[in-house]
Amino acid sequence: MISGGYLAPGYEITVVIADGLTTCVYDILGEFSDDTRLEDYGLDLCEMGSYTFSD
């Protein structure tokens, strides 16, 4: 797991989950510079195709 990264507001990054598993359902956690957190559980990323955090 990679942690401690920083992405400035207005920038974007693509994260590819290529773990070799056939699992589609994931939990996502976003931690922001103002100490707020966004937790989303049971997301079927295969069905969704993408997931976006925005400021």
Image (cartoon, rainbow, N blue to C red):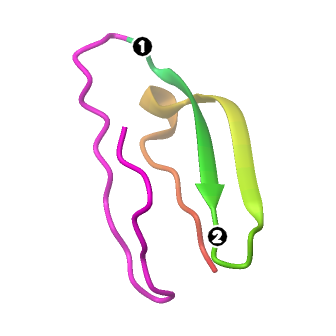
Quarter of the figure with residue 38: bottom right
54 is within the stretch colored magenta = no
> Residue 30's x, y, as percent?
61, 56
Query: Is label 1 in a helix, a strand or a loop?
Result: loop
- For residue 25, which quarter of the picture? top right
Residue sitting at x 31%, y 35%? 17
Q: Nearer the viewer, residue 53 or 7?
A: 7
Q: Say whether residue 18 is left or right of residue 8.
A: left
Q: Amino acid at mark 2?
A: Phe
Picture coordinates of residue 8, whole percent (x, y): 45, 85
Residue at image point 60% right, 73% down: 54
Q: Which residue is mark 1?
A: 23
Q: Which stretch is magenta?
A: 1-22
* Magenta stretch, main secondary structure class: loop
User: Would you name the residue on which mark 2 appears?
Assistant: 32
Image x and y of residue 48, in percent: 51, 38
Q: Residue at x 43, y 28 (%)?
A: 46
Report the quarter where the C terminus lies.
Answer: bottom right
Q: Residues within 10 Å of mark 2 (few under 14, many from 20)?
A: few
Q: Looking at this view, name the residue that lies furthest to the right.
A: 36
